[in-house]
Amino acid sequence: MIVLEHISYSYGARPALCDVSLAIGKGESVSLLGANGSGKSTLLKLLNGLIFADSGVYRFDGREITRKKLEDKVFARSLHQRIGFVFQNVDAQLFCADVYDEIAFGPRQMGFDEAETEGRVLDMIRLFGLAGFEYRNPCHLSGGEKRKVAIACVLSLNPEILVLDEPLTGLDPRSARWLAEFIAELNRSGKTILVSTHDLGLVQEISRRSILFGEDHRVAADTQTPALLDDVELLKRVNLVDRYYHKHSDARHSHFHIHNY
């Protein structure tokens, strides 16, 4: 569904992606790994049409995605309905007065009538256990509750691809466990999942394939997740784990060995 060919992008004189080529098929669950500043978040923004490559080609479902294409409101609406993006900082994604209107915002923007919108909102409230929160201001929610609302907002449009940037940021262990299991279940139901994360425990639970970025902003490895997690020397070389990390450590506790970016 997603094909990138020789993509490069810079923030002024500072490179973020250098000659990146990859392909992601329908129904895959793929983790993006790499040290802070290696280009993961930039790649996710590019996939969602928030920024555009300086060079190279991005194709989604066989169609090239360009700035000019996304000036077409119908095309842009279709892309944003098919690819759902959950930001690392969910506070940047939540801006309505209450939870109901947050979840209803996407369907309303897509032109659904109020009956369809209400049905989608109620489905999400049931799915995420948000009953009783409908008219609460999101700024008064916990970190885990905010992330549930942000994901509910995206899933209310039933996207084919769910993209999550550092989804476990700020979550307590119980919320993190729930989210990891939920992401895995979404993939089993047929959703294509793309997750940027530093958490090696999450990676092994949700993805069969992992793409590793080096500090040179290039793809350092694109392989099966178990093989990548076993390559400790490579993980050290790209500065994802420190010299005290051992591959025989319990991966569920691997965040104790990862640089906290």
Image (cartoon, grey):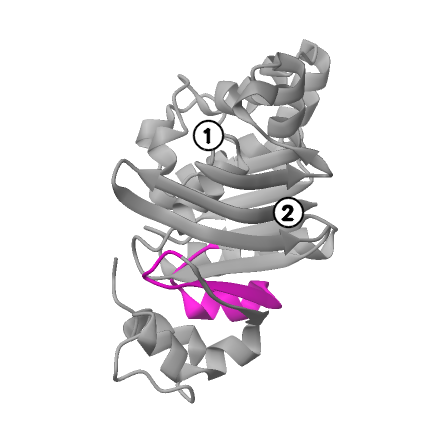
Q: Nearer the viewer, mark 1 or mark 2?
A: 2
Tell whether 261 sits left or right of 231.
left
For badge 1, the amino acid type reads: Leu
Viewer can see residue 166: no
Image spot of residue 101 (x, y percent): 50, 18
Q: Which residue is mark 2?
A: 3
Question: How far from the left and from the top, in percent, is residue 123?
Answer: 67, 32
Q: Residue at x 26, y 77 (%)?
A: 242
Q: Which one is in front, 203 or 37? A: 37
Residue plotted at (62% across, 68% down)? 208
Q: Quadrant of the C terminus?
A: bottom left
| Residue 50 among those drawn in magenta | no
Could you tell me residue 17's position as x and y percent? 40, 49
Q: Secondary structure at mark 1?
A: loop
Q: What residue is shown at x 64% (from left), y 47% (from top)?
A: 3
Residue 231 picture quarter: bottom left
Identify the magenta region. Answer: 196-217
For residue 173, what is the image quadrant?
A: bottom left
**Which class describes the residues within 10 Å of circle 2: few (<14), some (14-19), or many (20+)?**
some
- Residue sticking out furthest to the bottom: 248
Query: Residue 251 versus residue 174: which sits nearer the camera?
Result: 251
Tell me what residue is drawn at x 30 percent, y 38 percent. 11
CA gap between label 1 and label 2 equals 17 Å
Q: Earlier in the sequence, mark 1 or mark 2?
A: 2
Q: Which residue corresponds to mark 1?
A: 50
Check disc 2 and give the amino acid type: Val
Residue 174: quarter of image: bottom left
Nearest to the observer: residue 97 or residue 93: 93
